[in-house]
Amino acid sequence: MSLEKKQPIKTRLHFRNKNREQYDLKALIISNPELKDYLKPNKHGEDSVDFANPSAVKILNKALLNYYYGIKNWDFPDENLCPPIPGRADYIHHVADILSGNNFGKIPKGEKITCLDVGVGANCIYPIIGVTEYDWNFIGSDIDPKSIASAEAIVNSNVSLKNKVKCVLKESPRTMFRGIIEPENKIDVTICNPPFHSSTEEAKEGTKRKVKNLSGKRVKNPELNFAGISNELICEGGEAQFIENMIIESKSLAKNCLWFSTLVSKQSNLKGIYSTLEKMAAVQVKTIPMNTGNKATRIVAWTFLSKLEQKEWREERWG
């Protein structure tokens, strides 16, 4: 197994990320006038978004998607996860860089590329960014029928996403790929933002820390829906077990996918992840640090294809 480890360091957002610089609030308010009602002065007396308010974050995201990505219609139930757009965009850009490594340094774009989003969620955010930035095709899977219905509604209400994103309801919560990737299918890359808590109690503690970091206030019983519904946040064994299961299952589809990938929120889980990848005989593993705001995370990507097989993949699929 070829293992490329990089220690997470404080870095700026990806250089292609549209949100690297400070938000242009005036432009965003023009894009979505509602945003004006959710601003408050920061410690310097300047207008800022109240990031401790989930409604404010959702309105900000609507403005960002409209202004930077041309998405006019983006809505989903308030109980679902409201994603930070810059961090989600960084994942897509780094995945594009991984694919460029198989294409002489040039990012492959257009409908020849198919990306599977494991756990697309009600907000459909990764397909939105991947389609608008690189014109890729997406399959978005989820175990929650309501999330699939919400994601489909977003796709159908935005012309740029129609015929580019297919939303699929997973029948079994125990599998990530089976039933989605058929024997005849080829997927260029998979992405996943796994649930990272192992229990409701752990999720509540995480939400308390999040609210405190954003607002500076201790909240005894914060709204759990600030961070998402249970299946978005919680699974048996937490993030470590979820990713281990994903790696083990990916082995059975070794020839169907060029690159598998996942976000890893907890650095302490890396040792176990590398161990499982070695046991499954991954040919190549990449670890890419990401840093958004005060949150450090990383992408782990792996492939079971040899260099020759990767070359054949490019020639047969990307031309």
Image (tube, helix red, strand yellow):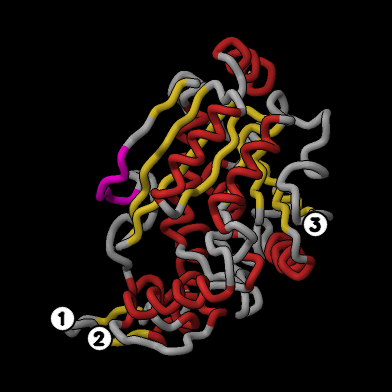
Relative placement, left or right, of 309 versus 289 is right
Element type where label 2 sits in the image = strand
Q: Are marks 2 and 1 in contact (CB under 8 Å)?
A: yes
Q: Which residue is mark 1?
A: 44
Residue 171 spot, x, y in % from top left = 84, 55
Q: Which mark is residue 169?
A: 3
Q: In this picture, is 127 found above or below 309?
A: below
Relative placement, left or right, of 100 versus 245 is left
The amino acid type, in three-letter code, at marker 1 is His
Dot 1 or dot 3, earlier in sequence: 1
Residue 63 spot, x, y in % from top left = 47, 71
Viewer-closest of 38 and 36: 38
Q: In this picture, is 3 found above or below 271?
A: above
Q: CA distance from mark 1 to mark 3?
A: 47 Å
Viewer-closest of 292 and 200: 200
Q: Which residue is mark 2?
A: 41
- Please give the range of residues in magenta: 7-13
